[in-house]
Image: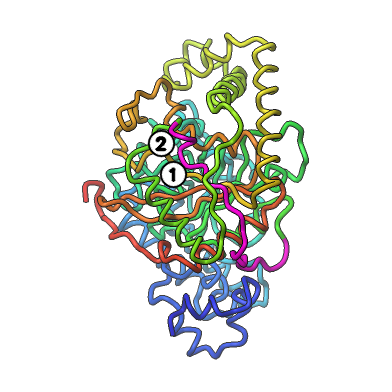
Amino acid sequence: MDRRRFLRNSVGLGAAVALQSAVPARVWAALLPGDIVDFTAIDLSNAIRTRRVGCVETMQAYLQHIHRHNPAYNAIVGMVDDDVLLAQARDADAALARGEYRGWMHGMPHAVKDLAPVAGLRFTDGSPMFANRIAEADSDLVARIRGDGAIFIGKTNSPEFGLGSQTYNPVFGATGSAWNPALTSGGSSGGAASGLGTHMLPVADGSDMMGSLRNPGAFNNVIGFRPSTNVMSGRDDDPRPLSTSGPMGRNTRDTIRFLQTIAAAPVRGPVDPLALRGSRIAWLGDLDGYLATEPGILGLCESALGTLRVAGAEIDPTAPVFDPADLLQCWTTLRHSGRRNMQRYLDDPATRGALKPELVWEIEQGLTLGETAVEHANGIRRRWVAEVERLFSEYDFLVLPTAQVFPFPKDVHWPTQIAGREMDTYHRWMEVVILASLAGVPTINVPVGFDGQGRPMGMQVMAKFGADRHVLEFALAYEDLTDHLDQRPRLATTASA
């Protein structure tokens, strides 16, 4: 029996997690992949908990896989020594033998995005100013992961201070897509997504301001979920933060399980696939031609929507009653104003030369802004939130492409032209993601397939604020209808392969 079909026929995520307890060991083993690194995170967790797979065995498999492929992709950086990791894995096995179970990630390898501190590990922010910094304590998110039993093997690569949807920095270099290491993995959670797509990690954490969970998800054919802003913070801030952390996974079920670990206010209980029949979906496309979009992207998304239509969903091409140019003005103003707190790096001759040009530009733009401009931008944002709420009074989901371009060469910092149209700033080429970011609503990247060159793409699915369970239920149903996540790249062992 096909494992994927077997799990689909279970009653939901909760049954899938508990399934091993009701299935004989020989049957369960037959359903699992042959290689430990190809287990889903949930399957690996269950195999470790029931001691069908050891923590040392797991760590050895992952380290061998990482050492073979990471030089080509540069997804995981600041690696901990193998001997240290294997000693931690032996300790995890010994704990299980004593009946001590630390959590669903017991003994599983994990690498944290290099924008968050992990006690005792390098914490560079992708900046040469902090190339040798060692974190003294865990962030709250990292503490939750540690509390569920994970073993930290290193960090995942990120662009300098997380700026830009392309993962490169002068400390560690550029990260390649799981589907072609010569192409970008996206960003800023590019190391996380590439690590997932290459099966160097079971799950991954990331963060998202301007598509940093979604864009890498699309460029690596994995799931990236930006939750409602209060899910990760546990606070109902007003205005909603532009940035939030969130989970990534090789599939939706793993993503949901990891969300339960890292969220301050997680989605509790089983999450089951949505009954799509009658669901109302607004297809925003390229906003009536406003967004420059590489040929082929809209067609892949529309093909995916056709699959949903066959399943009974109602698809309605829709345009928001809003000038999208106002959204970009709002976005750039608020983003620039948020960089003013980095002026000290710009003013100090010892650090100015360490800043990449895009960051210098953002700080300088922020310093030109007055409070009137910021308040005007916040006014635009309030009107946009109201328009999104109006749309959700008519539709269950809003859908549009995850990116405006397919993965491009990783030595290109950002596309200066799309479909013959010039990109006037390094924000413009990812303008498609700011609709969700400004609204603060839950948004998931789901895969839509590949172009003729084998480059992956995804689409963003948004639900109303607080409806995180609803959008995750949609993603489960979509995954059951498609086989995009079953596709595997042919992994390279050198960067030029």
Q: Earlier in the sequence, mark 2 or mark 1?
A: 2
Report how many numbered discs are placed on residues in the image.
2
Q: What kind of residue is marked 1?
A: Gly
Q: Regarding mark 2 in the picture, which secondary structure is present there?
A: loop
Q: Nearer the viewer, residue 314 or 131?
A: 314
Question: Which residue is at the front of the view, 122 or 84?
Answer: 122
x 59%, y 79%: residue: 10
In front: 449, or 116? Answer: 449
Q: Position of residue 327 (x, y in %)?
A: 57, 27
Task: Count residues near mark 1 (Cα–Cα under 10 Å), then give few for <14, some for 14-19, many for 20+.
Answer: many
Q: Does 269 lie within the magenta span?
A: yes
Say which residue appears at 45% left-offset and 72% top-offset.
57
Return the mark for residue 272.
none
Q: Residues within 10 Å of mark 2 (few under 14, many from 20)?
A: many
Give the vertical position of 162 relative to 120 (above or below).
above
Q: Secondary structure at mark 1?
A: helix
Does the magenta stretch mainly form a helix, a strand or a loop?
Answer: loop
Q: Is residue 192 left or right of residue 319?
A: left
Instruction: Report which residue position mark 2 lands on.
Output: 166
**Residue 190, which numbered label?**
1
In the rendered image, the quadrant that contains the N terminus is bottom left
From this viewpoint, is residue 146 visible?
no
